[in-house]
Amino acid sequence: MIRTALEFIRKELEAYMVDREQDPIHYNTGNVVDLKPVALPNGTLNINNNSHISLMLIGLDEERREGKRPVYLPIEDKQFARLHAPVEIDLFLMFAAHNASYETSLRDLSSVLCFFQANPVFDAQHFPALNDAAKEPATKPWQLIERLSFRMHNLGFEQHNNIWSMLGTKYLPNVLYKVNMLTVFETKAKEKAPAINEMNIN
């Protein structure tokens, strides 16, 4: 589902920037937004100066909430599968602008900001293509997502320095967004529970 979410955002952001710029020479589908790290594990820079934005996952957190309970799904023989409560996670996504022209990179970064200002929330009702990247949704429902909510995540200079040191490359103009809420839910149960046939209330 992380892949589903990031591929969807890549396509939507790219379509937005192509439409916004109206410049088919420099902004056309396939050369605007890349879904890849800005540096390879060996430290080699992994960007194309002819494209514009690199989108990458740089971290995730669990969204902890009280009162989560197991989920029960009906199965054969009037029994129920007992599933652990879903894990809700937040993604931290970086959008790095790296066009060969620095001025263009700054304009591209503004386009990213405008895109999420206009579209802070994505759901299947308003964005039917939300789960288009899911390859086998019928047999692999964990690939599907219901909703993505974006909020800009502020960093201090020291935190920026730590992130770029971790990435192993020099600073590029960028913006970081925190995305909630992606639900991780394993549907293969290890426990079974019998059906409740009657209730006693004293």
Image (spheres, rainbow, N blue to C red):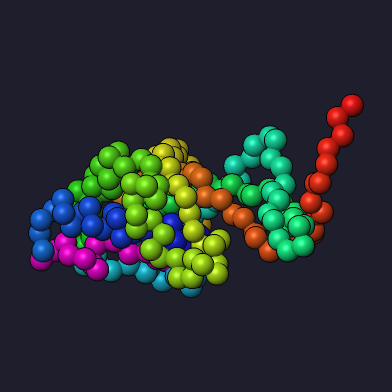
In this picture, is 166 found above or below 41?
above
Q: Quadrant of the C terminus?
A: top right
Name the residue: 17% across, 65% down: 28
Name the residue: 72% across, 47% down: 70
Name the residue: 41% across, 71% down: 44
In this picture, is 4 found above or below 69?
below
Seen from this angle, which residue lies furthest right? 202
Confirm whether residue 157 shows in the render: no
The image shows residue 118 at horizontal and vertical percentages of 27, 40
* Prevalent SS, magenta region: loop
Q: Quadrant of residue 55?
A: bottom left
With 114 as the anchor, is 134 left or right in this view? Answer: right
Confirm whether residue 115 shows in the render: yes
- Name the foreground residue: 61 vs 5: 5
Image: magenta residue range: 25-39
The image shows residue 8 at horizontal and vertical percentages of 37, 58
With 128 as the anchor, is 79 left or right in this view? Answer: right
The verdict on residue 28 being magenta is yes
The image shows residue 200 at horizontal and vertical percentages of 87, 34
Seen from this angle, which residue lies furthest top? 202
| Number of numbered discs | 0
The image shows residue 29 at horizontal and vertical percentages of 21, 66
Q: Quadrant of residue 83?
A: bottom right
- Name the foreground residue: 138 vs 155: 138
